[in-house]
Amino acid sequence: SSAASDVYKRQDMALGDGVRYTVFEAEKADTFSTFVQENVEFPQDELETTLKQIGVPEESMPPFEENLSGKILEKEDGSRLYILVSTQEKRVYFVQITV
């Protein structure tokens, strides 16, 4: 079995117009530290607005008050993938925005 299925349990998912939001429980959230950067400046307002639009409740939002690790990947077509890693909550948040 793959390590991911053992460690990451998909906890939440929301879909909206061009937006896909997935939250994983990650016992070893620090396993992600190999490819993410620390203290990434995420566009909090934009992400919160986007997630509210697709009905994500407050308690399922990424904990922006924490210094989140992560990565922002941008494709040529303007679509973006935000990977937010919370070591405190032991969760990994994926926000995929396609245009």
Image (cartoon, grey):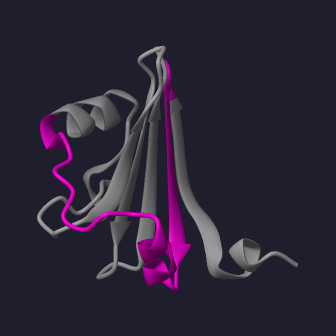
- The answer to whether residue 81 is above or below residue 60 is above
* Identity of the residue drawn at 43% across and 82% down: 30
User: Does the stretch in magenta take in 95?
Assistant: no
- Residue 38 place in picture, x, y as percent: 25, 68
- Judged left or right of residue 99, residue 8 is right
Nearer to the camera, 48 or 41: 41
- Judged left or right of residue 60, residue 14 is right
User: Does the stretch in magenta take in 39?
Assistant: yes
- The answer to whether residue 35 is above or below residue 76 is below
Residue 81 in which image quadrant? top left
Nearer to the camera, 51 or 8: 8
* Identity of the residue drawn at 13% across and 36% down: 45
Work out which residue is located at the far bottom of the displayed protein and give it. Answer: 27
- Residue 65 place in picture, x, y as percent: 11, 64
- Residue 64 place in picture, x, y as percent: 17, 58
* Identity of the residue drawn at 31% across and 63% down: 37
- Residue 70 place in picture, x, y as percent: 34, 59
* Identity of the residue drawn at 47% across and 18% down: 76
Quadrant of the image containing the N terminus: bottom right
Q: Which residues are the magenta region?
A: 16-45
Work out which residue is located at the far right of the displayed protein and give it. Answer: 1
- The answer to whether residue 26 is above or below residue 14 is below
- Judged left or right of residue 98, residue 57 is left
* Count of number-bearing discs: 0
Nearer to the camera, 1 or 17: 1
- Judged left or right of residue 9, residue 43 is left
